[in-house]
Amino acid sequence: MRQVKVAYLVAEGQDERWRDNVVEVFGDRHDISVFDPGQPAEAQLGDAEVVVDVGGACMTPELVAAAKQCRLWHILTVGYDLFDMDTMRQAGIAVSNVPGSTSAPSLANCAIMFMIQISVKYHEAQKQLRAGGLYQPMGAELEGRTLGMIGFGASARELAHRALAFGMKFMIIEPMPIEQALLDRYRPSFVGTPDDMDKVIAEADFVSLHLPLSPATRGIIDARRIGLMKPTASFINVARGDLVDQDALYEALMEGRIRGIGTDVHRGRYPDYKHPVYEHPDFYALPHIAGTTDGMVVRRAEAALENVDRIAEGLEPKWRVDNLQDDRP
């Protein structure tokens, strides 16, 4: 197999392990070099057949213009809602992302962590601990509680695998057919289409989002749907912040109309740390790191390497997204 020239774009401020792990996975199988933004772009990108973009946010029209021989722009992320796909289409460059399975275990771990934190009232318990208190607050068990999953792709299936060990029940909304083997394994009490979403939101003890962000799904959890949740129910989001009307969601928690929130994603891209909800004892948030683990970086690098191998062999790259129209659900 011939070697392919690969340019690797690393975002400013990115953990160095992203750079090092990707380069290590590629090894000497292909000619990979890390892009230096302080040097002329054309000299670094001009002969690259593949550009590996760590998060899809490194791409600019100027870099695309410099990559004159580029056949594939491979973004090391599942979501591509922040990626300028029109520029790539105009340049005639194929774009691939990585499959959801690369980050699904990490996202599921984070979701189950949020559910446990909310159930044991972790913030309040820490306050009691530091005050020298004992036996407060009283928590709740996950066993017997109903987990409503909106979307049943890779991360939702990994979450179901973990939640099953806690004895939870399942309700599922999924527009695509679900394999019978999965239904037999998780024995959901309800499986419906997006038309049935209100039912799941109204009955679940935990509502967990597992949808991609697209024009069809943006704001899909609006104020009306948030109003359907039980006052004892909690909302978990490790997918995309703009799937939800965050103002309505935060207001529901502040007013005591829902029990808790666990979120790793935020409106736009950055958390609004000045919002008073961040002081609420039942609000749990992370700075979009749920999927950022050592295992995830390696899995995504391996996916990119597989596609570079395909380019070397004259094959069509997998996981192309430049030719999709995502209307899900």
Image (tube, rainbow, N blue to C red):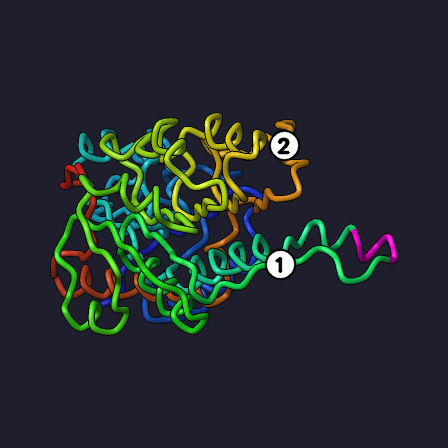
Residue 131 forms part of the magenta stretch:
yes
Residue 183 forms part of the magenta stretch:
no
Q: Residues within 10 Å of mark 2 (few under 14, many from 20)?
A: few
Q: Secondary structure at mark 2?
A: loop
Q: In terms of depth relative to the viewer, which is nearer, 169 or 71?
A: 169
Which picture quadrant has residue 27? Answer: bottom left
Residue drawn 45% across the image and 53% down it: 34
Residue drawn 35% across the image and 47% down it: 203
Q: Which residue is mark 1?
A: 139
Above or below, 204 relative to 325: below
Residue drawn 16% across the image and 61% down it: 178
The spot of residue 227 in percent (x, y) is 40, 31
273 sits left or right of 33 in the view: right
Which picture quadrant has residue 253? Answer: top right
Which picture quadrant has residue 116? Answer: bottom right
- Mark number displayed over residue 235: none
Residue drawn 69% across the image and 50% down it: 123
298 sits left or right of 258 in the view: left
The spot of residue 254 in percent (x, y) is 58, 31
Q: Amino acid at mark 2?
A: Tyr
Magenta span of residues: 128-132
Give the label, 2 or 1, closer to the camera.
1
Q: Secondary structure at mark 1?
A: loop
How many angstroms separate mark 2 from mark 1 (CA)?
27 Å
Q: Amino acid at mark 1?
A: Gly
Q: Which residue is mark 2?
A: 273
